[in-house]
Image (tube, rainbow, N blue to C red):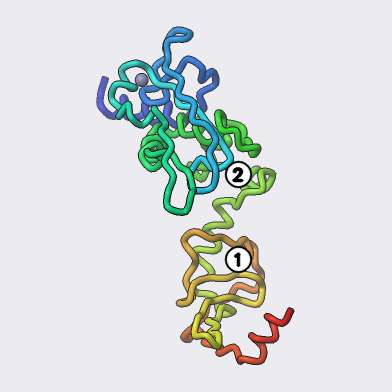
Amino acid sequence: MFEIERWNLMTNLNNKAILNPGNVCSKCLQKSKEHQLNIIHIGEMGYGSGFDSWSTEIHLCDKCLAETNLDWWDLEVVTDCNGFEAYKYDKEIFEYADNLPLASRELFYNHYSTDNYKMDAQDWIDYELELLPHEKCKDYGLYSPAETTAYKERFPICFYVSIRVFPDSSSSSRCMFGAFGDKEGNTYADTMTNACYGCEMFRIREDRIPIIYENRYRSEGLNVK
Ligand SMILES: [Zn+2]
């Protein structure tokens, strides 16, 4: 088999939901006979752990299990100076999970997750690939790729966006239609708004971004209880 064909096959498998995951290794995606996989159940923890209020599973064949650090799966719990508990290898477990094939990440974060929020397996994968249609995203209450693109592309160049500087010298950017961004008028990397998607007011800014100094009275007025 040519490398390119192998690559295509792997890509397809990776992006296809695993329909009967009970006997499929999360790492190599090979099928095993019933009860021959090592099932690692990662129990729910509290604030301080990435597993705060949810648990999940990873299923590994003997070979793939042997290639991991077996100490991780002892799931030893450590307590930090504030009294918060986490798995000693919390970070390593997430790094491992995040490097699994996409179809296995679906199992880790969706199928086996005890989080109440569940998606159809293929929808979860398609969402990660930014292929899930806008309407389906909205059915799940998720921001759609189109909304993300609109925010990333429009907000930084929109005429209606201004930088607001507050009396304490902190600043952020926003428009009057509900979109917001960082202190330089760029989008936030980890926060989203759908205000730019389909916004009929969008207009490209030709001059520099306006800077508005919020006066003390108004800012303090907002904080009156
Ligand atoms: Zn395996």
Q: Amino acid at mark 1?
A: Cys
Q: Which residue is mark 2?
A: 133
Q: Residue at x 47, y 71 (%)?
A: 186
Q: Nearer the viewer, residue 33 or 71?
A: 71
Q: Residue at x 44, y 44 (%)?
A: 79
Q: Amino acid at mark 2?
A: Pro
Q: Secondary structure at mark 2?
A: loop
Q: Secondary structure at mark 1?
A: loop
Residue 139 screen position, x and y as percent: 69, 44
Contact (Cβ within 8 Å) of mark 2 with mark 1: no
Q: Which residue is mark 1?
A: 196
Residue 184 screen position, x and y as percent: 45, 77
Q: Residue at x 60, y 65 (%)?
A: 196
Label 2 – label 1 distance at C-alpha: 18 Å
The N terminus sits in image quarter? top left
The C terminus sits in image quarter? bottom right
Q: Which mark is residue 84?
A: none
Q: Nearer the viewer, residue 154 or 219?
A: 219
